[in-house]
Image (cartoon, rainbow, N blue to C red):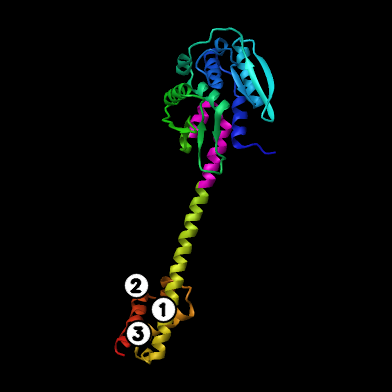
């Protein structure tokens, strides 16, 4: 079974090197989705269902000497993991966000993040569990130089980005370099496809206009021939008219090159216009 791009991205983030102690605390706060010490609240530090995210939380807590313990319980048809720690004083979450904003965002994304597939329109989001965590996430993103959009979904805060350049910048700051390369290469492919589509659409529209014009001209020339006024036109005009009927796919430039002697596009248009005026005069005199 193929993993979604979100899962692949999280797997890469879960393998990034664990930083210094302040960065470990910042990421753990992000993973926890809390702003108060979970030990005091008799809550686990991390609760979730993705094994590699739980393993990363365990490694970080081990580094912080929190003596982590993993507990499992069935929940809605799958296993829910929770990681508990001992009574080690945690630094203030605000200070952790200030010291290591990218690590706080990494932890929050691992726990509650989503990114669209690389071949879809860009959408990157984190759904924090409450307004307090949302406040610190906005501060962390601003510290990274990114103005993130804030919304709500089913009464819960939602932070999101839709600009591809901003998303790749944030992923790079979090350490997901392989995902950044994948996203940028996909962006190049999408840009090339859009350019090709624009060229094809333009050529198709030009071809349609040329064919419609040729059909109208052929119809007019046939009516002028049937009216008896064709013989009164100069031979040079007749030559262009006959070429127009024989080669409706030719542009004015190609018609002009096959006239003897060759003439410009403007001259071709002038001679065809003379044929149209001949038909118009015929209709007016009836």
Query: Of helix, strand and loop, which mostly describes the magenta segment?
Result: helix
Between the C-alphas of marks 2 and 3, the distance is: 20 Å
Residue 257 makes an appearance in the image: no
Residue 60 point in image, percent of width and height:
60, 16
Label 3, label 1: how far apart the Cα atoms are: 11 Å
Residue found at x 44% / y 70%: 210
The residue singled out by tag 2 in the image is 266
Quadrant placement of the C terminus: bottom left
Q: Give the residues in magenta.
A: 167-190
Depth check: 36 or 172 in front? Answer: 36
Relative placement, left or right, of 212 versus 40 is left
Q: Does residue 196 show up?
A: yes
Q: Which of the two discs, 2 and 3, sits closer to the camera?
A: 3
First-in-chain label (2 vs 1): 1
Query: Where does label 1 land, which residue?
Result: 217
Query: Nearest the camera: 16 or 140?
Result: 140
In this view, the residue in front, 202 or 53, is: 53
Find disc 3 in the rendering and name its residue.
279
Neighbour class for label 2 at 10 Å: few (<14), some, many (≥20)? few
Q: Determine the residue positioned at 32% across, 82% down.
A: 277
Quadrant for the N terminus in the image: top right
Q: Residues within 10 Å of mark 1 (few under 14, many from 20)?
A: many
């Amino acid at each position: 079974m193929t993993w979604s791009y979100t899962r692949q991205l999280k797997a890469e983030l879960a393998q990034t090197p664990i930083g210094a102690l302040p960065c470990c605390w910042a990421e753990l706060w992000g993973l926890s989705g809390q702003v108060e010490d979970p030990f005091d609240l008799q809550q686990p530090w991390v609760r979730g269902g993705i094994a590699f995210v739980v393993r990363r939380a365990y490694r970080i807590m081990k580094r912080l000497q929190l003596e982590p313990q993993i507990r499992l319980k069935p929940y809605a048809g799958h296993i829910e993991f929770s990681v508990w720690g001992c009574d080690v004083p945690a630094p203030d979450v605000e200070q952790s966000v200030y010291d290591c904003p990218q690590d706080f965002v990494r932890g929050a994304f691992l726990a509650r993040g989503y990114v669209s597939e690389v071949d879809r329109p860009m959408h990157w989001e984190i759904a924090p569990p409450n307004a307090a965590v949302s406040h610190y996430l906005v501060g962390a993103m601003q510290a990274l130089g990114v103005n993130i959009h804030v919304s709500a979904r089913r009464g819960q805060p939602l932070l999101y980005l839709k600009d591809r350049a901003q998303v790749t910048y944030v992923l790079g700051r979090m350490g997901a370099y392989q995902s950044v390369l994948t996203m940028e290469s996909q962006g190049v492919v999408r840009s090339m496809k859009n350019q090709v589509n624009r060229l094809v659409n333009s050529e198709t529209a030009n071809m349609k206009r040329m064919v419609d014009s040729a059909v109208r001209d052929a119809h007019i020339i046939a009516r002028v021939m049937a009216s008896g006024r064709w013989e009164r036109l100069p031979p040079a005009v007749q030559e262009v008219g006959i070429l127009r009927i024989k080669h409706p796919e030719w542009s004015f430039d190609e018609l002009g090159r096959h006239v003897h002697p060759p003439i410009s596009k403007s001259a071709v248009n002038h001679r065809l216009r003379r044929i149209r005026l001949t038909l118009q005069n015929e209709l007016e005199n009836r």
